[in-house]
Image: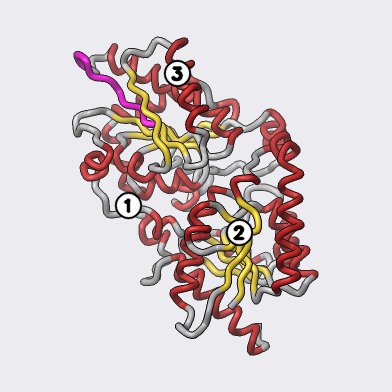
Amino acid sequence: MKVLISAAEISSDAHGAQLLSALRALLPAHEKLEAFGIGGVKLQEAGLETIADARDLLAMGSTEVLMRLPKILRALRSVTASARDRRPDVAIVIDYPDFHFRLAKRLKEQGVPVIYYIPPKVWVWRKRRVQILRERFAKILCILPFEESFYREAGVSVKYVGNPLADELPLQISKSEARKKLGIDASTQMLALLPGSRPAELKRHFELMLNSAARAARRLRENGLLGGEEKLLARVSLTANADREHFEKSLEVWRQKSSAPELEVVLSWDDSALVLASADAGLIKSGTSTLEAALLKCPHVVVYKPSGLTSFLFKHLVRYRGPVGLVNLFSGWKEGQPLVARELLMDQLTVDSLSEEAYRLLTDESARAAMIAEFEKLRNLVTAGESASPSETAAREILEFAQALKRGGA
């Protein structure tokens, strides 16, 4: 079997790797799996032959896209040419809609059926894109339970397969076990900071989170909740592709200009699951990490500071007024209901508001307990009630689709 896989964003790399491993495991022993396309380190380790490296395409917002446009277009041309030459049985694209809508159009013109795994959140905005999904994609495999009915009502072939985080996270690890792995004392108050993975996200969130953590630590000390030489530990978990030297220098600059004796800041890479499992609370950039935090029972606030242009568009052109945090969406939120995790977005996100919420999460035990109780309800939802893992369920759907194609029935 020959498959093209495109995980053209680093945040999708692990999902793609899990899916590729599941595909290989489900294939009969006599059948070889040939996989090529776009991915990062984890997909490459899982056996993907990379036509383009996802790390070269990392972009967010109109300015960054323009700067990386030559590389993005080159990758689009390369993977299209490879598909023409190698004729895959099926193409699987993961997230990253602006790139994959264009790729799907080219692949469909070549007669290659395209399956969308982890589709875009068109139900938030750009609902007109549903027509593109219906026209260019043979099937949608969604990972949020409420998406299935939305897509089905729009006439899209869809299947909810569960959430791949269930495969990737150490869901059974205890807080004490996680702290032991990271060398953190059981008595230390700890705040997890996850500023994001894309360059623009890191730029907008990194210092803001540090300043908020410092202010929360100062308030803990003033109210007698940090005694003696105790400090609040803020552990900043960055993705593996984040520039280590840049962030170490940025932290040093921040320390020189900020007086925060009550706060200890530690940078770490590619360990978000352990950091979240260890933390008393978290400041988490909106996205997959918020669901990761919920599944690891870390009380948190959802934050997001977009560019000025994105803020303007969202305020004035987008009609969606619901939550954006995955834990709030998974909870089946309805208008008028309180959110499971507070969201501080756009203009609402300031050092004042974020430090206030950080302090509340660290000190209000009843609020923490209520939040964790809601998190515990998510476990069955992310597995879609299946005995198989979500990645295996997705892989099985793909294989059944490919087999039906060979029989002439898809």
Amino acid residing under circle 1: Glu
Mark 3 lies on a secondary structure that is helix
Q: Is residue 279 magenta?
A: no
Q: Which residue is mark 3?
A: 252
Q: Nearer the viewer, residue 242 or 351?
A: 242
Q: Position of residue 11 (x, y in %)?
A: 53, 48
Per the model, the C-alpha gap separating discs 2 and 3 is 36 Å
Residue 233 falls in image quadrant: top left
Which comes sooner in the sequence, label 2 or label 3? 2
**Quadrant position of the C terminus in the picture:** bottom right
Callout 1 crowding tier (Cα within 10 Å): few <14, some 14–19, many ≥20? few
Image height check: is 262 above or below 342? above
Q: Nearer the viewer, residue 310 or 50?
A: 50
Mark 1 lies on a secondary structure that is helix
The residue positioned 52% from the left and 58% from the top of the image is 43
Mark 2 lies on a secondary structure that is strand
**Is residue 351 at all visible to an observer of this figure?**
yes
Q: Nearer the viewer, mark 1 or mark 3?
A: 3
Tag on residue 251?
none
Per the model, the C-alpha gap separating discs 1 and 2 is 38 Å
Which comes sooner in the sequence, label 1 or label 2? 2
Per the model, the C-alpha gap separating discs 1 and 3 is 38 Å
Callout 3 crowding tier (Cα within 10 Å): few <14, some 14–19, many ≥20? few
Judge left or right: residue 295 versus residue 407: left
The residue positioned 31% from the left and 29% from the top of the image is 362
Amino acid residing under circle 2: Thr
Judge left or right: residue 163 versus residue 156: left
Residue 279 falls in image quadrant: top left
Image height check: is 301 above or below 39? above
Q: Write the start and end of the magenta stretch as one range.
A: 227-235
Amino acid residing under circle 3: Glu
Q: Which residue is mark 2?
A: 50
